[in-house]
Amino acid sequence: MKSFVSVLAGALVAGLLSTAAYAEKLVLYTSQPNEDAQATVDAFQAVNPGIEVEWVREGTTKIMAKLMAEIEAGNPVADVLLIADTVTMQRLKEAGHLADYKSPEAANFDAALYDADGAYYSTKMITTGIVYNTSAAMKPAGWQDLAKSGAKGLVTMPSPLTSGAALIHAQTLTGIDGLGWDYYKALAANGATAAGGNGGVLKAVATGEKAYGMLVDFMAIREKAKGARVEFVFPAEGVSAVTEPVGILKTAKNLDAAKKFVDFLLSEEGQKAAVKMGYIPARNGVALPEGYPARETIKVLPVNAAEAVKNSDADLKTFSGIFGTN
Amino acid sequence: MLERSDARSRSRWLRFPFQGRTIGVSKVRAGASPAAEPRWLVPFVFACLLLLCLLPLFSLAKAGFAGLVSGRSIGVLTEPATFAAIRNTLITATGGMVVSVVIGALFAFSVALTDVRGKLMLSFAFMLPMMIPPQVTALAWVEMTGPASPLLKTLGIAPPLGSPQPLYSLAGISLLFGVQHAPLVFLALKAGLSAAPRDGVEAARLAGATPFRVFRDIVAPLSLPGLIAGAAIAFVSGVGNFGIPAILGIPAGIEVLPTLIYTRLASFGAGTFGEIALLSSLIALIAAAGLILQQRALAGRDYRIIGISGANAAFSLGRFRVVVELALVAILFLVLVAPLSALVASSLVPAYGVPLNWQTVSLRAYEEILFRQAMTLKALGNSMFLATGAALGLLAVSVPAAYLMTRRKGWLADTLGILIEIPYALPGIVLAVAFILTFAAALPLLNVSLYGTIWIILIAYFSSFLAVSLKPVMSAFLQMDPSLEEAARLSGAGFLQRMRDVILPLVAPAAGAAIILVFLIAANELTVSALLWSAGTQTLGVAIFNLDDSGSSDLAAALSVLVVVMVVALMAALEALARYLPEGVLPWRN
């Protein structure tokens, strides 16, 4: 048995060492779901065959915690970040962690979709609306429906403490007249729960633990296409949106590969790859995936990015105060 | 036997603390006999513990102190959330300990002492829940009991839409702690029971003692140390468990200390390191309190046994045999078969909430895991490497440490014991932060940083599982009569020769158990690697957790099923090799 184990260990060590033999490398930190992260990397490598990509996936706040711990330790591993929201990117930029890179592809994007200095670029639009289980009694049409007695104890939402999109969502809704923090207090009083990320919300609603949830569009629409008994609603008041920006770290060890990655995501092929996964593309002139209404009919609620950056900590505390510590 | 008492009194004299040691050694030298222990032993063990236990704790303490001094983190100690987390931690860890002891003791007594049939299969199956990662256990149970449960739907008793999930509660967390940690009690207890003197039991039976009296007067006292040790390790494991409360507690707003730390860390901000350092010191206090209770309970007892060990079928159950067998099988069905079936079912459905039947069954999840996701095989390779490295490497520390701790009673052994237990008791997430803080900067002289490499995870595993490796080795040493080694020593055998010819053969079964325990726990580890993993160093536990977290629990279930298949295959391979292995290496055999 001893020799068996040592042979096994030897083989494993050899296997680990052999992976170091690639010419060009890229380390990507992303908050995309695993399947999408792998699909993105596969599409990128199809265009750039010489580059080996190592990718790490976690929720935006967790990937940021990992990155900040690494920066604190003086050894950030990532070259490129592909995370949920520009607010987090803006914070990183202000802290001086992002490299400025002017991508030639930016010409095909609205100026509002990227940083003027080139610190980060939006790659797609992800809206947060309402998902419901098709066997639920009430068919919600707007955000207020979730605070009504018909949804008592049946609502769940992702926690801003875990999800970048959820934080922007809360900051968007609380900035709207007629909703505000009072809306979240009403939700809490109605027995709504807020925990974990979007994946947990999808699961709770699809399996019937909860009837209604706040959820990012692509997860609900994709899961419905796979046969799950869920329906997605763009609420009457409008949806919040994040734009999944990509940015290069100043400390990137593989700068050329990182630039190629940014260019690819913004390119037509890159955008079509995102559409294939079910995302709303950010680039002008690329069609929406199946299952979505026309782009003009989706009403996106505004959010003040500068305010959002400034108030993030206070907003998280307020949210925690309403929904408990999680 | 005459020589034995002589040798023992001599060894007591030699073990006189401190100055006594030097005197003893010089006296023995004068008598041209080898030293009781080589000079490098104490420095070696202390160097290892310094690196694995003290250094990360020191880094944490520094961060906690900095947080206190700057005033940014002190608020965490007075928050209501912290008090709630302490209360929930104590309730669930205690509840889990009670469940573990009940189930674990039932199995250990039945298998070790009675004439139930199919002992090997029972033990084999009972060991499995421990190898299933806690977060997978929790997921499988949720699949089994929720409103969408295929099992309950088939039975027509599925709760209506929006029904609360009963496991999302303190009782649910306690129950799964109990299921997860019962094999630890089982192992600890069975090791002691197997060493129970059969001749003693037989003598009592021949003298007319009833089975109950034999149990009360002979078996129960002898099984007490194993029971207390098992209960303590179950309690401490519950205090540090992250996977189960993360999945069952967070959706219900029930925080325990490890999940509170995790959520604090996931919303990283100024003062976070200080806060989690302070919170983890609370966990350390709770764990230390549990261990001190254990040591007090065991104080003043001497459990060395002389005579033929082994108590095969000491009790005949008669007509109750079938009842006991049915009860054991029913428990196994509930803790193993049903959740694993739910897991398999959820790996085969195309989407959440879709009922499983011949029209909907899909292998897409397996296809994605095996042929599309590049990270699966990498995670598998990483976990195998880490588990093998930790299991074998730790013996080099745990055997000398256990030797020191048994040969030298008193404050030195107590200190070593507590030092070793604390990293194990700390939640993995805190240990991970401690190791980031300790090893992030480039190593002196070598000028390489371990951070972001697989080696930092390996070292953290060494720290985290030292206690796991030590426990079986330690109990082997505790039950070994020191006269054997003394005899070898007086006959002129040096320390290394005594190790090779006397000590290692005697502790080999326990060492084998330690290797397997560490391997199985490390292969499915989640919490330590959850923060230390980086590009290319993800482990199986991280891969499963991450898949579920990203909303792909079908993929998570598929990977979990593959892990379970692999573990069972590994166990079956060892079982096939059993007759070539020393007696007692495989924990489910005797």
Image (cartoon, coloured by chain):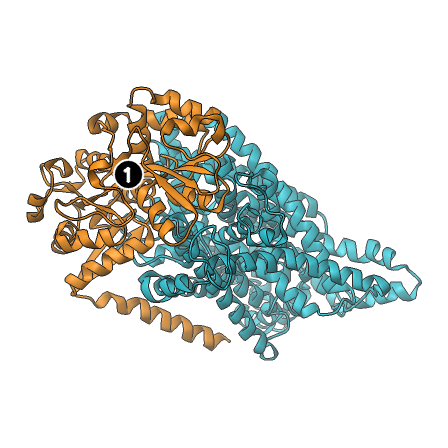
Chain colours: A orange, B cyan
Disc 1 residue type (three-letter):
Thr
- Residue B277: x and y in percent read 42, 36
User: Which quadrant would residue A66 be assigned to in this image?
Assistant: top left
Q: Which residue is mark 1?
A: A127
- Residue B496: x and y in percent read 52, 70
Q: Could you tell me which chain the residue with mark 1 belongs to?
A: A
- Residue A240: x and y in percent read 28, 33
Q: Nearer the viewer, residue B356 or B15?
A: B356
Q: Nearer the viewer, residue B470 or A216?
A: A216
Element type where label 1 sits in the image:
strand
Q: Is residue B27 left or right of residue A76?
A: right
The residue lying furthest to the right in this view is B208
Q: Residues within 10 Å of mark 1 (few under 14, many from 20)?
A: many
User: Which quadrant would residue A164 be assigned to in this image?
Assistant: top left
- Residue B371: x and y in percent read 34, 67
Image quadrant where one finds the C terminus of chain A = top left
| Residue lying at 64% horizontally and 46% vertically, measured from the top left | B97
| Residue lying at 55% horizontally and 55% vertically, measured from the top left | B22
| Residue lying at 67% horizontally and 64% vertically, measured from the top left | B480
| Residue lying at 51% horizontally and 32% vertically, measured from the top left | A153
Q: Is residue B478 left or right of residue A180?
A: right
Q: Nearer the viewer, residue A198 or A82?
A: A198
